[in-house]
Image (tube, rainbow, N blue to C red):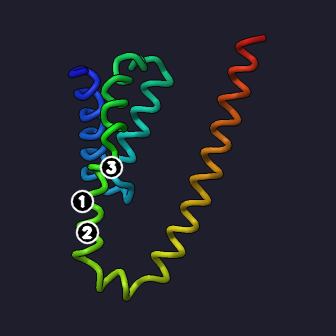
Amino acid sequence: MVRGLALLLGFQLLGELISRLTGIPIPGNVIGMALMLAALGSGLVRLAWVEEAAELLLSHLALFFIPAGVGVMVYGKLIAREWLPISVATVVSTFVVMAVTGKVAQRLEKGERQDAE
């Protein structure tokens, strides 16, 4: 469990460092997540090492939305003023995520079928 949490936090820290040092306009946690995905895909990190920690974090996922909820309350006037771009970005990004998730699921399913044959 401790190793899994350390790996997850380490990849997030690495992503934050890359984001801040390079000035890339991508959030550090997204970069860290991509690095973790690459490490899992390449076998550098085994799924069993992080699975228990990830399941623990996912089971308490609602707690991670508290800061976002507080932010909405604090910046309520700004959000009300910029509702159109926020709404468009939310809808577009939702469809992009759905499309990417669908493509990844199709590829994973296709790979599993080829492995089974």
Check disc 2 and give the amino acid type.
Answer: Gly
C-alpha distance separating marks 2 and 1: 6 Å
Q: Relative to residue 7, is residue 96 drawn left or right?
A: right
Mark 2: which secondary structure? helix
Q: Relative to residue 52, is residue 115 drawn left or right?
A: right
Label total for image: 3
Label 2 CA crowd tier, 10 Å (few <14, some 14–19, many 20+): few
Which residue position is annotated with label 3? 62
Instruction: Identify the residue at horizontal 49%, vertical 83% (top origin).
Output: 84
Which sits in the foreground, 63 or 89? 63
Check disc 3 and give the amino acid type.
Answer: Ala
| Dots 2, 1 in contact, CB < 8 A | yes
Looking at the rendered image, the quarter that the C terminus falls into is top right
Give coordinates of residue 111: x percent, y percent.
69, 23
Give coordinates of residue 44: x percent, y percent.
40, 18
- Sequence order check: which comes first, mark 3 or mark 1? 3
Instruction: Identify the residue at horizontal 34%, vertical 45% (top origin).
Output: 61
| Dots 2, 3 in contact, CB < 8 A | no
Give coordinates of residue 87: x percent, y percent.
50, 75
Looking at the rendered image, the quarter that the N terminus falls into is top left
Viewer-nearest of discs 2 and 3: 3
Instruction: Identify the residue at horizontal 57%, vertical 53% (top origin).
Output: 97
Q: Relative to residue 88, is residue 1 drawn left or right?
A: left
Give coordinates of residue 105: x percent, y percent.
65, 36
C-alpha distance separating marks 3 and 1: 10 Å
Which residue position is annotated with label 1? 67
Label 1 CA crowd tier, 10 Å (few <14, some 14–19, many 20+): few
Residue 95 to residue 15: above or below: below
Which residue position is annotated with label 2? 71
Residue 91, image quadrant: bottom right
Residue 106 to residue 84: above or below: above
